[in-house]
Amino acid sequence: SSLQEMGPDEAANYLKENELVSALPKIITTAFKTVNLIYFFTAGPDEVKGWVIRRGFKAPQAAGTIHTDFERGFICAEVMAFADLKELGSEAEVKGAGKYKQEGKTYVVQDGDVIFFKFNVTNAKK
């Protein structure tokens, strides 16, 4: 059977046993860079979701990929870098280290940002 058809654990064992390295992560990374795509993440108490946007999108445009109301009623984006979250271990630690930021409409989303969008939509779209 091919590596593609194996489960994640089986594939990892196969690669290790045969002293091979999969090129798939590099292919994905290169393809994303080539077409100017990046990831950002949203997180709640029981879910983390990754979103794909074009490099250069500002916070309201990124919010709009989730729902058009998020873009229309954009107030601000609370942002932390995934690398900081991974290094420090929790949102509270990121805040404690001063690496949790509130950003406005001109903020350009960075690859790997973890974002909580604040928005308010009070009237119907005209």
Image: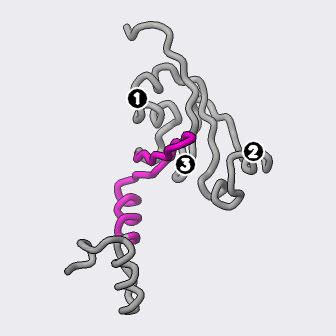
- Where 119 sits versus 84, above or below? above
Residue at image coords 38%, 66%: 30
Give the amino acid at mark 2: Lys
Which part of the image, by quadrant, shows the N terminus? bottom left
Labels 2 and 3: the sequence-earlier one:
2
SS state under label 2? helix
Marks 1 and 2, Cα distance to the nearest angstrom?
27 Å
Give the residue pinned by disc 1: 67
Q: Nearer the viewer, mark 1 or mark 3?
A: 1
Task: Write down the quadrant of residue 79 in the picture.
Answer: top right
Q: Secondary structure at mark 1?
A: loop
Residue at the spot x=37%, y=7% of the render?
126
The reply to whether dot 1 and dot 2 touch (C-beta < 8 Å) is no
In the structure shown, which secondary structural element does the residue marked by tag 3 occupy?
loop
Res. 51 image quadrant:
top left
Q: Residues within 10 Å of mark 2 (few under 14, many from 20)?
A: some
- Report the disc number at residue 11: none
Q: Identify the amino acid type marked 1.
A: His
Disc nearer the start of the sequence (1/2) = 1
Which stretch is magenta? 25-52
Name the residue that disc number 2 marks. Answer: 95
x and y percentages locating residue 36 in the rendered image: 40, 53
Q: Residues within 10 Å of mark 1 (few under 14, many from 20)?
A: few
Badge 3 crowding class, 10 Å Cα cut-off, few under 14, some 14 to 19, many 20 or more, is: some
Q: Position of residue 101 (x, y in %)?
A: 69, 40
Residue drawn 36% across and 71% down?
Answer: 8
Q: Amino acid at mark 3?
A: Gln
Q: Which mark is residue 110?
A: 3
